[in-house]
Image (cartoon, rainbow, N blue to C red):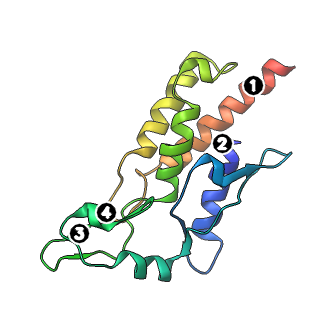
Amino acid sequence: MALSFLDMVAHFDHDFSHRLHLCDIKPENFAIRSDFTAVAIDVDMAFFEPKMREILEQNCTGDEDCNFFDCFSKCDLRVHRCGAQRANSNLQVICDKIFRHWFSSPLRSPGVSLPLGRQLRAAVQECAAPGDPQGRAPRGVFSKLRRLLQAALRELQEKDK
């Protein structure tokens, strides 16, 4: 399932003419199909890049004024305006609000080796952390998560044999 969330993030970031921003990420806004693929089912707070920029650009006195649900921007105190560029990403919020819960303890990952479980937890923490000023998760974290999740899937499949 977690791999499916990564596929969905990549799809929203690259497969449309504009990036699609999800501003209300929580487990109940997604469904899992019988083939274990994740689908967004509540998308009333999903916006393509041009609309997202319009929503984020507003007057502010601090960064907290630039938060629109799960989509954050930064306040430029020189002009008291929020930046049009999102300061976090869909990946970061999914890591924070979904993956962090799934991979929070060794007991939540039965069947996955302890070292791999530790690596997954560390990668999720890194993914959820603030990234660069352009709103991207730390460099390489998407690939690292994909690699670790694929390794976990292989471990689980080996145990099923």
Q: Nearer the viewer, mark 1 or mark 2?
A: 2
Q: Which residue is mark 2?
A: 2
Mark 3, residue position: 75
Gap in angstroms between the C-alphas marked 3 and 4: 12 Å
Q: Quadrant of the N terminus?
A: top right
Instruction: Answer with mark 2 or mark 3, whichever residue precedes in sequence.
Output: 2
Give the label on residue 133, or none: 4
For marks 4 and 2, give the CA distance.
Answer: 26 Å
What kind of residue is marked 4? Pro
Q: Is residue 42 above or below residue 33?
A: below
Instruction: Mark 3 vs mark 1: give the one in front.
Output: 3
What secondary structure is marked by label 4?
A: loop
Percent of width and height locating residue 39 = 72, 56
Amino acid residing under circle 2: Ala
Query: What is the count of numbered marks?
Result: 4
Decide if residue 87 is on the left or right side of residue 30: left
The answer to which of 9 and 151 lies nearer the viewer is: 9
Q: Earlier in the sequence, mark 3 or mark 1?
A: 3
Q: Looking at the picture, which amino acid does disc 3 mark?
A: Cys
- Local packing at callout 2 (Cα closer than 10 Å; few below 14, some 14-19, many 20+) is many
Q: Residue 134 is drawn in which quadrant?
A: bottom left
User: Between residues 63 and 143, which one lies in front from this camera angle?
Assistant: 63
Query: Looking at the image, is mark 2 or mark 3 nearer the viewer?
Result: 3
**Left or right of 94 in this view: 1:** right
Please state which of residues 81 and 129 is positioned toward the viewer in this rendering: 81
Residue at 87% in and 19% down:
161
